[in-house]
Every structure is written in C-alpha cells, then in structure tokens.
C-alpha cells in the first residue's frame, strides 16, 4: 500500500481532489469537523446528517456516493465520538472506515480527519494507529495455499493535513510504514511451518536483511558454537538433525563511542518439549516458538528501512527442540558458556537454555542495554493472558528506568507490557542438589522463575526480559502470529533516536 501526505491549502482544496473516497469526520451531536464544514458548501453533509443515518457516534459511518459538486467519487462520513476523542473511539472509527471501504471498488482514499483529536496524543500517534489498523485488516497469510485471495483494491491512502503538521506527519508516516514492514516480516516468519522455517531459514532471512540494509552479519555454525563453549544451547540443539545457527546482526550507525542496544530473540523453530514431550493437542502452535527471533528480525527490518542513527545488535540462537537418541534427558547436567552448570529437570524448559548462552555472548558488546524477547513460559499466559507481554528487570535505579522506558514505548504503539518482579526469594526455587541451578523452579510463579534463571546470566549489564508467550500469536480461528512486540521495540528505539 502507498501512503502520501497532501497539505490543506488552496491548490489542494478538498472539493477539487480527485479520489475514490474522502473520509470526513463528524463529532457526536452532529457537529462537523473543519474538513466537513469545508466540503459542505452545497449542504450535502448537513442533509446526510439530517437523514438520521449517521449520528457522529464513534464507529458509525455513512457512505455518500457521487456527491454533487465534489470531485471525489464518494464521501465517507465517519463518527468520531466526543471531542476530545478517547483512544479506543479513534481506533474504532478508523476500524469502521477501513471495514466500510474495503469491499468497495475504492483504489485510493483520502483521510481528511483531524489527527490531533485524542487527548495527550499527537498527530504521530494517530497516523501510527491508522497504519496499524490498515495492517491488521489487510495482512494475509495465504502464501502457502494453492490459490491466493485477489490483491486488495485499496492501493493508496493519503492524509489531508494542515501544512503546519506536514513535517511531523511525514516523519510519523515514514516510521509507521517501517514498523508495519517489520511486523509483516515478523508475522510472515512466525506463520511459516517448522519444516520451512528452520534455523537455517532464519539465518537466510538475516542474510537477506543484511544484504538489503548493509547490516554486518555473522552466522555461527555448530563448530563455532562449540568453540564458544555454549554447552547449554548445544544441548538443546543436539536432539535434532537440523543444524543450529547462532545469528548476529549489527547496525552500527551511531557514534562509535555509543554503547549498543542488544536485542536477543528466542529462535526455537519447533518446540516439541523434547524428551519431556508436550501433549499432542495444539502442538502445531510450537512452530511459533521462534517469534522472539522473528521480532528481532522484524525490528531490524524497520531499523534498516529508517536508517536509525544508533548502534544496535541482534542476536538469535536458533535450533529445534526435539526428542531423539541425542536429546537432553531429565537430570542431564550441562555447562553454559558462563561456566555455570545447569541441571535439566525438564527438557521443555529449553528457551532459557538457549538464551542463557546468547545472553553471556552479549557481554562482549559492552551493551548499553540488552533486551531479550522470548515465548518463554505458558505461565506468563496464565498470569497476563493475551493482552500484556511480561516485562522483567532487576529492581535498581537503572533497571527501573529501563522498565519505565519500555512501558512508555509500549503505550505509544499500543503494544502493552506489564511488569513482574525478579526477587532473590524466587531464586530459591532454582536450587539443584547437583548443579549450580536447575532449569525449572516448579509450578508457582513459573514465568518469574524463568526470568530469574535468565537473570543469573545478565549481571554484567542492564537487562530487560520480555515474555511474549501470550502475545506473539493468536490461537483458534484467528490463528496466526501478531508481530508483537515489534511495535514496542521500535517505539523504544525511536525514543532513543531523539
Ligand atoms: N515455548 C514454551 C512456552 C510456551 C508454552 C509458550 C505455551 C506459549 C504457549 C516453553 O519452551 C516451555 O515449554 N515452557 C514450559 C516451562 C516449564 C517446563 C517449566 C511451560 O511453560 O510449560
Ligand atoms: Mn518448551
Ligand atoms: Zn519453547
């Protein structure tokens, strides 16, 4: 889809603009927005309102075909609710507009809506949300069906805005488009089945990105991973015939003295549980266990599109977790890259086993912050459902700041997180009689003990952990990857860009 901005001035007067559809806002109680007043010279909007078919309530809409004395083929009158508009009313209005236009023969549309309507939100926020709604409604996942749905009719969307908003809107649009491209990549990768999206496939994706955007790239194979002594990661990988890959992407466009942000994504391309085999029902969804990796790749897509002026490193440990004669067995003890030993009491707690070595590897970059992203625990779904991702950090000043920044970023792009604690008292649950720690902490607070496990490998830098088990994909009839938390990660990087 193509996006553009048209400034509201004399040469762009609304009635003269030739487009398939202009979307105009109406407030609750029949009040017109400025654009609606400008277009109502012949009373077409007033008459439509008098008909009673539209009230201005958020989510109401009325399509007027071939309006007199207006160049556009259609007018879509869109209820925006009260002024100032609530966030959810604005999103609902946009949702309705897109749903109305989508089945019609509308190739291009002009949104002549006020974009500074939502209190404490700006033009950028509105533009982001409009693109996010378009993405939600137009994303397709039928690439592997033998026939695809015909491409969408709507190809071009323009924003009609006052000229003083042009600079802000242009930058917001550029960023929102990059985030959508990143989400699309993350969703596409997440949705691919594990027989296609293997560790090697993820490495190939990283290679493609590095070629397109000139990222530095390292792909470590099994031998190189062995020489780094990543005994924990390798113990998971060895149950599968599919070779593991350790992927490192670097975008070093900040000052040479700026410490990098490091993003670490869990890349289990299929999680059967291993010898601690998962039940069969719903096991297909464990193809989504690489959504952390997909989020890192998606975020790098956005980083590359925008050419952010920062130092950012992406790390993806990628392998399968399968049962076999070579697989980890409950009770096995492995030595991680950090030297700490781990008793594997459950082979299904494999995410932490691959992440701990990636987190140790991250030390070598002397990071400003490290953020890991992982579909780590079913317990996180129990705690937070499918709304919030889990956010974990230690609880000192630097980490409170990082957590606050991530929460603010999450709010900005509607990709919510909720903070959960990491405390020494929970670390007790990871005690092992035979090794430095066990890889599971029992049933209570399962997502917290998983975070506590990772915490032991992150003490040399400032670190946050995002558990996206409940938010990275949807089940049931809407089954599919969501692209989260690409928006959150992008918003966080954008905050650092200013
Ligand atoms: N990938 C799963 C976590 C998961 C499960 C995400 C269901 C989304 C939906 C992870 O590797 C796992 O299996 N975790 C175990 C940990 C347990 C053995 C301590 C879990 O959550 O059951
Ligand atoms: Mn598992
Ligand atoms: Zn897993």
Image: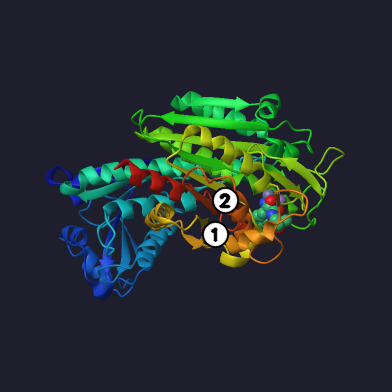
- Where is ligand 1, by quadrant? bottom right
In the rendering, at what x and y percent does residue 378 appear? Answer: 66, 59
Label 1 Cα crowd, 10 Å radius (few <14 / some 14-19 / many 20+): many
Q: In which quadrant of the rendered view does residue 115 lie?
A: bottom left
Foreground pick, 346 / 489: 346
Give the image location of residue 84, x and y in percent.
25, 68
Does residue 55 appear to the left or right of 386 in the view shown?
left
* Protein image colouring: rainbow
Identified at 22% across, 63% down, the residue is 44
Question: Badge 2, how many Cα within 10 Å: few under 14, some, many 20+?
Answer: many
Q: Is mark 1 within 8 Å of ligand 1?
A: no
User: Disc 2, disc 1: CB below 8 Å?
Assistant: yes
> In this orientation, which residue lies closer to the viewer: 430 or 141?
430
Closer to the N terminus: mark 2 or mark 1?
Answer: 1
> Which residue matches tag 2?
455
Q: Residue at x 51, y 47 (%)?
A: 139
Q: Tell me where residue 259 appears, x and y as whole percent.
A: 40, 35
- The quadrant of the rendering that contains the N terminus is top left
Q: Residue at x 74, y 48 (%)?
A: 435
Residue at image mark 1 = 422
Q: Quadrant of the C terminus?
A: top left
215 and 457: which is toward the camera = 457
Q: Secondary structure at mark 1?
A: loop
In this picture, residue 96 sits left or right of residue 445: left
- Whether residue 421 is visible here, answered yes or no, is yes
What is the x, y in percent for residue 241?
79, 33
Q: Residue at the location (39% across, 49% down)?
A: 131
């Amino acid at each position: 889809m193509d996006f553009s901005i048209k400034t509201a001035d004399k040469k762009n007067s609304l009635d003269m603009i030739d487009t398939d559809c202009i979307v105009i806002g109406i407030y609750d109680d029949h009040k017109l927005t400025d654009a609606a007043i400008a277009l109502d010279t012949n009373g077409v909007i007033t008459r439509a309102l008098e008909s009673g078919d539209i009230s201005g309530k958020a989510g109401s809409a009325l399509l007027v075909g071939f309006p007199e004395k207006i160049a556009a083929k259609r007018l879509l009158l869109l209820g925006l609710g009260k002024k100032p508009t609530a966030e959810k009313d604005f999103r609902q209005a946009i949702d309705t507009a897109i749903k109305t236009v989508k089945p019609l023969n509308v190739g291009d549309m002009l949104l002549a809506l006020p974009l500074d309507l939502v209190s404490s939100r700006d033009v950028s926020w509105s533009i982001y949300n409009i693109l996010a709604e378009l993405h939600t409604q137009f994303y397709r996942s039928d690439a592997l069906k033998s026939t695809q749905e015909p491409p969408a009719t709507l190809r071009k969307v323009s924003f009609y805005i006052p000229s003083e908003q042009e600079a802000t809107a242009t930058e917001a649009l550029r960023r929102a488009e990059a985030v959508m491209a990143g989400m699309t990549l993350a969703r596409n990768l997440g949705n691919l089945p594990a027989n296609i999206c293997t560790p090697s496939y993820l490495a190939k994706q990283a290679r493609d990105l590095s070629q397109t955007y000139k990222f530095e790239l390292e792909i470590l194979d099994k031998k190189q991973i062995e020489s780094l002594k990543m005994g924990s990661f390798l113990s998971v990988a060895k149950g599968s015939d599919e070779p593991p890959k350790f992927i490192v992407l670097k975008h070093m466009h900040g000052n040479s003295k700026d410490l990098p942000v490091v993003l670490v994504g869990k890349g289990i391309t299929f999680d059967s549980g291993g010898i601690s085999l998962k039940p069969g029902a719903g096991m297909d969804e464990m193809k989504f266990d690489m959504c952390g990796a997909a989020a890192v790749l998606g975020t790098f897509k956005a980083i590359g599109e925008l050419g952010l002026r920062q130092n950012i490193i992406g790390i993806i440990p990628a392998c399968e977790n399968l049962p076999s004669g070579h697989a980890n067995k409950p009770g096995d003890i492995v030595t991680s890259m950090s030297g700490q030993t781990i008793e594997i009491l459950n082979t299904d707690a494999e995410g932490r086993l691959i992440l701990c070595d990636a987190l140790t590897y991250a030390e070598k970059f002397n990071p400003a912050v490290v953020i890991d992203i992982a579909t780590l625990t079913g317990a996180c779904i129990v705690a937070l459902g499918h709304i919030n991702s889990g956010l974990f950090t230690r609880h000192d000043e630097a980490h409170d700041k990082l957590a606050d920044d991530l929460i603010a970023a999450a709010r900005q792009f509607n990709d919510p997180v909720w903070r959960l604690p990491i405390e020494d008292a929970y670390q007790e649950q990871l005690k092992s009689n035979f090794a430095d720690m066990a890889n599971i902490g029992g049933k209570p607070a399962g997502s917290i003990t998983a975070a506590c496990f990772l915490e032991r490998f992150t003490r040399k830098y400032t670190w946050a952990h995002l558990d996206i088990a409940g938010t990275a994909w949807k089940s049931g009839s809407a089954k599919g990857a969501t692209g989260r938390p690409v928006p959150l990660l992008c918003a966080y990087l954008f905050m650092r860009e200013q």
